[in-house]
Amino acid sequence: MMSVLSGLLAVGLVVGLSAGSALAVEPTDNTGAGQSATQALDSLEVKGRAPKTGYKRTQFGKAWADVDHNGCDTRNDILNRDLTDVKHKVRTHDCVVESGQLHDPYTGKDIAFKKGWKTSTAVQIDHVVALSDAWQKGAQKLSQTKRTELANDPYNLLAVQGKANQKKSDGDAATWLPSNKSFRCEYVARQIGVKHKYSLWITQAEKEAISKVLSSCPTQTVPDYTGVKDSTVEKTTESEQTEQTQTEQQTEQSAEQAQQNQQTTQAPAPEPAPAPAPAPQPAPQQDVYYQNCTAARAAGAAPIYQGQPGYRSQLDRDHDGVACE
């Protein structure tokens, strides 16, 4: 009896361990992690962009769902991962981030994050492969569960500067790349990994754009980690940050000035004098037929020039363009 119980217990342990192992899915699984990014790019299917018809954010599940069931939503999971000097809201079990520092991979700038109605947007969580882009390149064929996984996958998420995230919108590599050039290789390599993981395709223009980036870093591999490696992101100096800020301010001021100029009331230019009414066109003459020149002369039509009503080559004996001379 004891041997039977021992056997059943052993089987139960094996089954339990197997089930636990099946649930322990790493974010880098099926991404091609560690493989040459160029080779992984060539393995992706190239097709045209499908229509955006039917796309809604809800097609990818509840925003920032706690898919890993750790008691913390996805947004705060990523803030905790990517920010330094993090301070948490009390009694949230070190989940809700109140403040912290971000070294933004997209711009190379250091950004102070503070949770608040007017301040939280300074740092946003970006889908490296935008959900709308994914929808148009294969995600609409995925199950709701798989799309929810894609939307909350830490491998596809980065904390970044809010303005940069807004500029990117739902663009792919053919329409948007980080202004921080030192991060572009890792950025497109991660896009390759995400698309490989979820069986998404790329467009020809997208492939060409990614290939151009990877030509400057032929040893780049598909990332085998989530988040950003500090060694791949160059920090901008204080003077460079000041220069970038001044440039952005000048651009915004120029745009505001242009808008003000358009809104400035100007004296209307005098209306041009109306064009004179066109002279009345003579009523088109009816087709005329003269049996011979005698009839033409009797009608007072002779001589008849070529192009005039009644002219026929048979009446123009010398073929000089004048009949019944």
Image: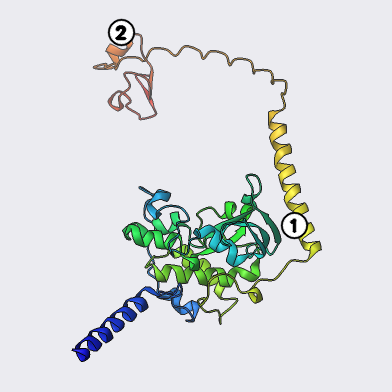
Q: Residues within 10 Å of mark 2 (few under 14, many from 20)?
A: few
41 relative to 114, above or below: below
The quarter of the picture where residue 214 lies is: bottom right
Identify the residue at horizontal 38%, vertical 12% (top origin).
283
| Residue in the foreground of this view, choosing between 314 and 119 | 119
Q: Which residue is mark 2?
A: 298
Residue 41 is situated, as x and y percent measured from the top left of the image, at 45, 74
Query: On the picture, is 12 further left or further right than 38?
Result: left
The numbered mark at residue 244 is 1
- 304 lies above or below 103: above
Could you give the CA–CA distance between mark 1 and mark 2, rounded to whole angstroms? 93 Å
Task: State which tag comes first along the sequence, 1 or 2.
Answer: 1
Q: Residue 286 placed where, x, y %?
A: 31, 14
Three-letter code for the amino acid on which mark 2 is drawn: Ala
Rendered view: 313 above or below 13:
above
Q: Amino acid at mark 1?
A: Gln
